[in-house]
């Protein structure tokens, strides 16, 4: 099981790095430059991201999966616990760095790549039912990253953001959620199946635009890395601290909380525990780079932080999943 998990994680990371390498070479050869990548992040942020969010509701909730109230309640409790742990934890660190670097490190600690890495991994480890729980995780991630995450990116030296409430509540991510939540209600309450061919005239354009997210984001990441000092990436102690918090402390803290609930409150089904841990232990989300580009932060720093953590996740994720499955065998 350990080696199977190791290969599943490694395979996803290799795929990501191959796309990053294409972006790196494209910049060096002048085919897709740093300037073009900056423009592309605008496309990602304002058009592709809302499509990704809406499409996640259509694809992940239209498969007829049904879970009980107990499982749904536990999933929401543990997802809330993940961020209740990660957000305060991130604020305990990175106090001496300039505010521009501080917000990137903290965002990278809080928000993991539960979409690209978490979703296919839970499908491989748990199966289709686990995808439903990961879809809930992605929903919670989108809600928080485009509210708390946006607020955090605008924080000043005093830890407060000079930001109107409307800018937090009205952005591409929350607009995607405003469209996606009614779709979720149609699917779960009224049993609409929007994945059928009859709806494809509406759903296919959304899916096609959303499918640009990972490859285009990775191309941009490669381009940004082409303008950073890669030799010093793995010498930066802050990157290791981010990786330690994101890849080890956050998931291990969540696992301890799951074990407490399981032992003293209510039995936690194995499919719930494993699915949630798969969603909690991926490396920093790619939108750390996207947010840095759109909110005028250090894109190079964000790129190296995400790149180094993604590389190290090959070592940490299989170990964590192997331990979890010892206590919660599927």
Image: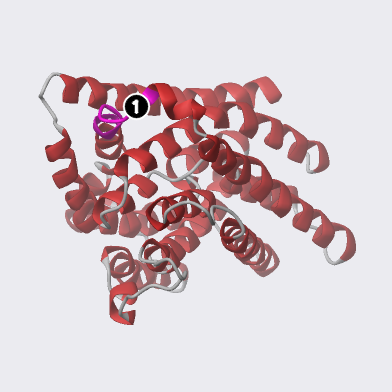
| Vertical comparison of 309 with 101: above or below | above
The image shows residue 289 at horizontal and vertical percentages of 34, 45
Q: For label 1, count other residues whose C-alpha is less than 10 Å away and answer few (under 14), some (14-19) or many (20+).
A: few
Indicate the quadrant containing the C terminus: top left, top right, bottom left or bottom right.
top right
Stretch in magenta: 222-230
The quadrant where residue 282 appears: top right
The quadrant where residue 265 appears: bottom right
The image shows residue 281 at horizontal and vertical percentages of 60, 43
Q: Is residue 167 magenta?
A: no
Q: Nearer the viewer, residue 211 or 65?
A: 211
Q: Residue at x 31, y 52 (%)?
A: 297
Seen as rendered, the residue at the extreme bottom is: 165
Q: Is residue 63 visible?
A: no
User: Residue at label 1?
Assistant: 229
Q: Nearer the viewer, residue 295 or 200?
A: 295
319 relative position to 186: left or right = right
The quadrant where residue 223 appears: top left
Q: Residue at x 25, y 24 (%)?
A: 24
The image shows residue 299 at horizontal and vertical percentages of 30, 43
215 relative position to 184: left or right = left
Give the colouring mode of the picture. Answer: secondary structure
């Amino acid at each position: 099981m350990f080696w199977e998990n190791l290969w599943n994680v490694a395979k996803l990371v290799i795929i990501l790095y191959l796309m990053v390498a294409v972006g790196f070479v494209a910049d060096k050869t002048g085919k897709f430059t740093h300037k073009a990548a900056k423009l592309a992040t605008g496309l990602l942020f304002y058009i592709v991201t809302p499509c990704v969010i809406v499409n996640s509701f259509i694809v992940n909730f239209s498969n007829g999966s049904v879970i009980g109230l107990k499982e749904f309640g536990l999933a929401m409790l543990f997802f809330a616990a993940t961020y209740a742990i990660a957000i305060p934890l991130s604020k305990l660190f990175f106090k001496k760095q300039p505010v521009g670097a501080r917000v990137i490190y903290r965002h990278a600690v809080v928000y993991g790549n539960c979409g690209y890495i978490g979703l296919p991994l839970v499908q491989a480890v748990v199966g289709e039912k686990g995808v439903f729980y990961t879809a809930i995780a992605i929903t919670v991630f989108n809600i928080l990253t485009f509210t708390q995450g946006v607020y955090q990116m605008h924080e000043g030296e005093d830890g407060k953001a000079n930001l109107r409430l409307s800018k937090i509540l009205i952005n591409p991510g929350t607009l995607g959620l405003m469209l996606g939540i009614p779709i979720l209600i149609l699917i779960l309450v009224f049993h609409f199946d929007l994945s059928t061919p009859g709806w494809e005239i509406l759903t296919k354009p959304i899916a096609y635009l959303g499918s640009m997210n990972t490859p285009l984001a990775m191309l941009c990441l490669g381009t940004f890395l082409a303008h950073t000092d890669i030799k010093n990436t793995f010498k930066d102690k802050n990157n290791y601290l981010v990786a330690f918090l994101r890849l080890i402390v956050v998931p291990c803290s969540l696992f301890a909380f799951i074990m407490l609930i399981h032992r003293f409150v209510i039995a936690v089904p194995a499919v719930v525990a494993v699915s949630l841990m798969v969603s909690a232990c991926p490396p920093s989300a790619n939108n750390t780079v996207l947010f840095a580009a759109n909110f005028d932060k250090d894109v190079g720093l964000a790129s190296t932080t995400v790149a180094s953590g993604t590389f190290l996740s090959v070592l940490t994720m299989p170990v964590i999943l192997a331990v979890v499955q010892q206590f919660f065998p599927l």
